[in-house]
Amino acid sequence: MNRLKPWQIILPATEPSNFLSQGVAITGMGIISAIGNNVAENYHALINQQKGISRVSKIETHHKHDIMVGEIAATNKQLEIQLGLETTHNYSRTALLGAIAAKQAVVDAQITNVSEYRTGLVSATSVGGMDMTEKYYYEYLENKALQKYIESHHAGDSTQKIAQQLGIEQSLVTTISTACSSGANAIMFGARLIKTGRLDRVVVGGTDCLSKFTINGFKTLMILSDSYNAPFDENRSGLNLGEAAAYLVLESDSIVNKENKKPLAYLTGYGNANDAYHQTASSEQGDGATLAMQKALSVARLNPSDINYINAHGTATANNDLSEGRAIIRVFGENPPAFSSTKPYTGHTLAAAGAIEAVYSILALQNNILFPNLNFVTQMKEFALTPQYNLKQKELTHVLSNSFGFGGNCSSLIFSKQG
Amino acid sequence: MKKVFINGLCSVSAQKTFDNNFFLGSIIEYKDTVIPAVDPLYKEFILPAAARRMAKGIKMGVVASKIALANAKINTVDAIITGTGMGCVRDSEKFVSDIIDNNEEFLTPTAFIQSTHNTVGGQIALEITCQGYNFTYVHSSISFESALMDALLQLQNEEATNILVGGVDELGDHTVKIHSLIGHIKHNPVSTFGMVNSETEGAVFSEGANFFVLSNKAENNYAQLIDVQTYNVLEAENLPKIVTAFLNSNQYSLEEIDMVVLGNNGDVKYDGYYNILTRSLFSKTPQVYYKHLCGEFNTSSAFGFWLASKILKTQNVPSYVMLNDIYPKKMDTILLYNQYRGENHSFVLLKKC
Amino acid sequence: MSNLKEELKTKIIEQLNLEDITVGDIADDDSLFGDGLGLDSIDALELIVMLDKDYGIKLSDPKEGRKIFESIETMANYIASHRTK
């Protein structure tokens, strides 16, 4: 197999046309995570350095004393009440969280009539309805009352329900699942739908709840930390899983102009590439990550030096942080822009990660602030990179956010103050 | 905007379709409620070292991809876009049952890794060393059409030249069992040609992988992909209006449609959606169906896409896919329509090159 | 000890689905990873579970596996001196 050498960076075959290099306006956002039930609460926790990592309380697992997680405080019951669902509903926790965050985003975008424009939904999930499946797997065979959850297992189900909650009908509604880059990829496809004129408005993001399935899955890979995750630290010991949902509203320029809206920010760049290296591990030199960042810069027509802050994927596994750090050096040189991972706050929220970190990137831009990479103590020995470890005020114009997943899936998004 | 063509294809299905030298020469007749895919000789395409951990879905996907690439006479692509409703469901079942049965002890990673929905797309990338764009759509019966739309938009706007697009799903025992319980699978076996008029609820479940090379360069092509559109929900009575609007938005009139390829699966509860169209707009149009051959699965509509592409290329329509007895006068333009259990509707428009 | 080695070969072939390989194909000092049998990091994790389940040996860091899983020889030696079942 021909591996890419550090100096062999392949740019997309064709330069993006003017039409494709235009930014897409972001007019609303919503979030629920271990550090807060809405955008304001999340921001408050970020700037006050309050992490949401604890022992798991809502899942009865054999591993509860060996792991730490980023769990959302609300119970399913509380979420149901918040959404006003009938008791006969068959929402998985993934769908409940997604519906709450997506509704916030639509309110934030001041949308009162969702059918006024061609409005779609692109949602990401990796867990889907697995939380119910693992609970009732064998019981389904005997207990008729539980069988309603059989239909909520597949990944598209949570998205259909979120669309219904938002009142999106007779429209484009779809789901992306590319492991831990899913959320970023949903945002990327949404941008393509706006740019090509397929839709005027699209709600994009991701949702994943904690489950025994993912806890045990990551446990078999031996990459779960028994302590607070410490990205880019020499002594990092793995990741903390988390649960979250976040959505953005993307709108076409014509809506923004017509309604005289003031976008929160713009999505100006995006890129996805594949490591084509290993089923789960990232390549040592971060080929896929390098390509993804390069593509995003190319779409945004920016130079590496234009980026002021990187919200890193930074899961705190040995493999990710080494591979991502090397990719950052390949793209930005030995003195890259300030970078930090916000996973010490929320845990790794899988398919929601790219979406919640998009919200954090926009908050960074709006407030000209760099969020600290908590728990960092010692620089890694492989390179001289120190993440931004304290809160810092800084004028920001362009922020790049990374999300990488199994199957070699690497994505980068660029958020900018101006389109 | 560039035109988009189908330059290569392969179908692994419950029929012996993977060999592109034949086009449904003979068919396998079933009388069952669940029908498995016919296995190609995987060893001819995948090295044993790589195959040993692969789920059936991955094997089907990798083989279908490799044959589709060879059929398009290319070695690699700029992007791989996969649709799958359930991913490698057998491994998901294995991992969940192991968690429960072994009380979260002695679990191994392989089944978990394969459970990730993009595992097929990732493995194809590994097999053909493709570092390009790699997406996986997982939205029930429009998983494949979502992938198709993504590819269409990228090719129209010259973000890529060749894209591998496919749909893949596999059968899993537990999934079959619980979907029988809730009536999504027929209770009593039906024969291949008895399916569509079975008058019973549920479908005949199956599995398969249908992959295509889409390109904005017209070489060795099967057909031109004009457009694809999906709808999460729609009212049955709005169907004629929606179809007409879809055609009109592509500058086509109803009269220009030479054939409709429909996703009838013999579920008396939901085939009514097709009937609305076959009894109104398309009552005088040749009608084709295919799920009696390939069964129902979340990406079975990709088999319909394969069938329509083959029909356009060969200008031949096998008699046993005809739903009515109107033989086409010409085969230039085909409209595909599919839905599953009244949700996730898709329309695809294909044209002869 | 030679029984244990044969047992390990059989288990590895079965557990890791090495379809085209027989016990006779694996020499005691063949390297299991890289150029030898061609196992990878996921296989290493599978073997760690095997140590736990069949021999009562718990490894907490996958890096520890590297030395142990060098060959059938090293594996058998490690198991013989650390097994709890």
Image (cartoon, coloured by chain):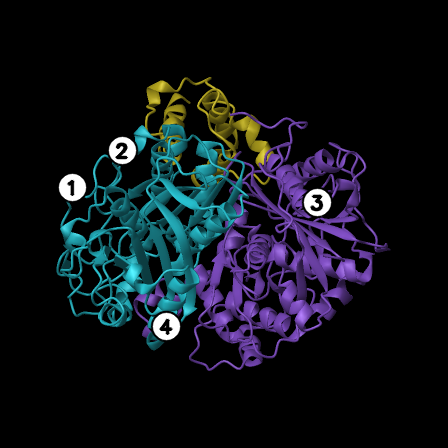
Q: What's the residue type where badge 4 is placed?
A: Lys
- From the image, tell me which residue sits under label 4: B241
Chain C: what color?
yellow
Chain A: what color?
purple
Label 2, label 4: how far apart the Cα atoms are: 46 Å
Q: Which label is found at residue A301? A: 3
Chain identifier of the residue bearing label 4 in the image: B
Label 3, label 1: how far apart the Cα atoms are: 52 Å
Q: Which label is found at residue A246? A: none
Q: Is residue B7 visible?
A: yes
Q: Could you classify mark 2 by the number of other residues whose Cα lies within 10 Å: few (under 14), some (14-19), or many (20 or more)?
A: few
- From the image, tell me which residue sits under label 1: B25
- Choose mark 2 or mark 1, whichever is in front: 1
The structure residue drawn at horizontal position 51% and vertical position 47%, both measured from the top left corner, is: B154
- Choose mark 3 or mark 1, whichever is in front: 3
| x and y, in percent, of residue B36 in the image | 24, 48
Q: What's the residue type where badge 1 is placed?
A: Gly
Mark closer to the chain start, 2 or 4? 2
- From the image, tell me which residue sits under label 2: B41
